[in-house]
């Protein structure tokens, strides 16, 4: 029942959030467009995680957790921290800085609550790498007594769906911030907590 509830809530959030953000206008500056695109990618990953889970493609769903987290962190960094030279080189195809450097810069922003991002990085980065790169978690989740088949634990799937929705919420709020739209940000918050109230950990609520 808990897994089915998590799937239903993930779908509710996917539908409501998309509806709320539909038609949002972003200013045409390179910085805004780059950051908004990364936040949009973050939210699209949640939709993919939900869809893959719904179709039983769980390894692929778990593999998207690191890219979703990275898309959000990069969105914040290119919106709030990146010098113009780094922004322009990224648009031309250069690699962004490593995740630890991005989080360092975000961590010194005076008006941004970065503590939850740093806690997530410390707590789960190794696991996210395992998910994405076919590590031991992905292998163990396919080994049963007599065959190779999906053997993911229900509580892990529930946690993935919830965390993906949290990242999606953060991505949409990032888009609202770029558009300077406090009404949208508040509507997203109200909608998110109407679905997930009572389900989230202290880190997710930060």
Image (cartoon, rainbow, N blue to C red):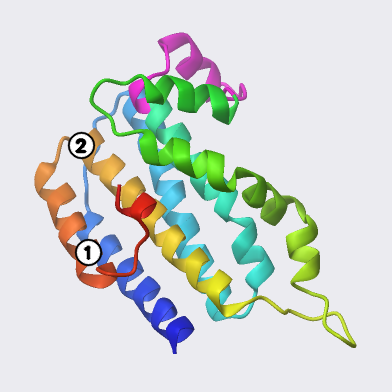
Vertical placement of 103 versus 189: above or below? above
Which one is earlier in the sequence, the residue at label 2 or at label 1? 2
Residue found at x 11% / y 42%:
182
Residue found at x 26% / y 71%:
195
- Where are the magenta residues, as a range? 79-97
Disc number placed over residue 193 in the picture, else none: 1
Quarter where residue 16 is shown: bottom left
Q: How many marks?
A: 2
Give SS at disc 2.
loop
Q: Is residue 89 left or right of residue 144?
A: left
Residue 6 picture location, percent across and down: 42, 77
Residue 19 picture location, percent across and down: 24, 64
Residue 21 picture location, percent across and down: 24, 54
Q: Looking at the figure, which quarter contains the N terminus?
A: bottom left
The Cα atoms of the two marked residues, 2 and 1, are separated by: 22 Å
Q: Sort mark 2 into few (<14), some (14-19) or many (20+) by Cα contacts within 10 Å.
A: some
Quarter where residue 64 is shown: bottom right
Which residue is identified by label 2? 179
Residue nearest the viewer, comparing 73 with 16: 73
Quarter where residue 106 is shown: top left
Q: Is residue 99 left or right of residue 15?
A: right
Q: Sort mark 1 into few (<14), some (14-19) or many (20+) by Cα contacts within 10 Å.
A: some
Disc number placed over residue 15 in the picture, else none: none
Residue nearest the viewer, comparing 155 with 176: 155
Instruction: Examine the structure image and report whether residue 25 is included in the region drawn in magenta.
Output: no
Instruction: Examine the structure image and report whether residue 86 is included in the region drawn in magenta.
Output: yes
Q: Is residue 9 left or right of residue 62?
A: left
């Amino acid at each position: 029942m808990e897994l089915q509830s998590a799937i239903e809530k993930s779908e509710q959030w996917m539908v409501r959030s998309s509806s709320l953000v539909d038609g949002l206008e972003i200013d045409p500056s390179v910085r805004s467009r780059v950051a908004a695109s990364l936040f949009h990618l973050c939210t699209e990953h949640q939709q993919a995680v939900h869809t893959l889970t719904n179709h039983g493609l769980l390894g692929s769903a778990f593999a998207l957790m690191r890219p979703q987290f990275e898309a959000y962190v990069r969105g914040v960094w290119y919106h709030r921290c990146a010098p113009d030279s780094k922004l322009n080189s990224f648009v031309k195809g250069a690699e962004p800085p490593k995740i630890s450097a991005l989080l360092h810069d975000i961590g010194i922003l005076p008006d941004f609550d970065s503590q939850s991002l740093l806690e997530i990085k410390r707590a789960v980065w190794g696991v996210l790498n395992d998910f994405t790169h076919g590590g031991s978690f992905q292998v163990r989740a396919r080994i049963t007594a007599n065959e190779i088949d999906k053997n993911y634990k229900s509580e892990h799937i529930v946690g993935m769906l919830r965390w993906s929705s949290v990242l999606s919420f953060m991505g949409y709020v990032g888009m609202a911030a770029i558009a300077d739209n406090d009404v949208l940000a508040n509507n997203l918050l109200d909608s998110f907590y109407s679905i997930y109230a009572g389900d989230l950990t202290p880190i997710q609520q930060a």
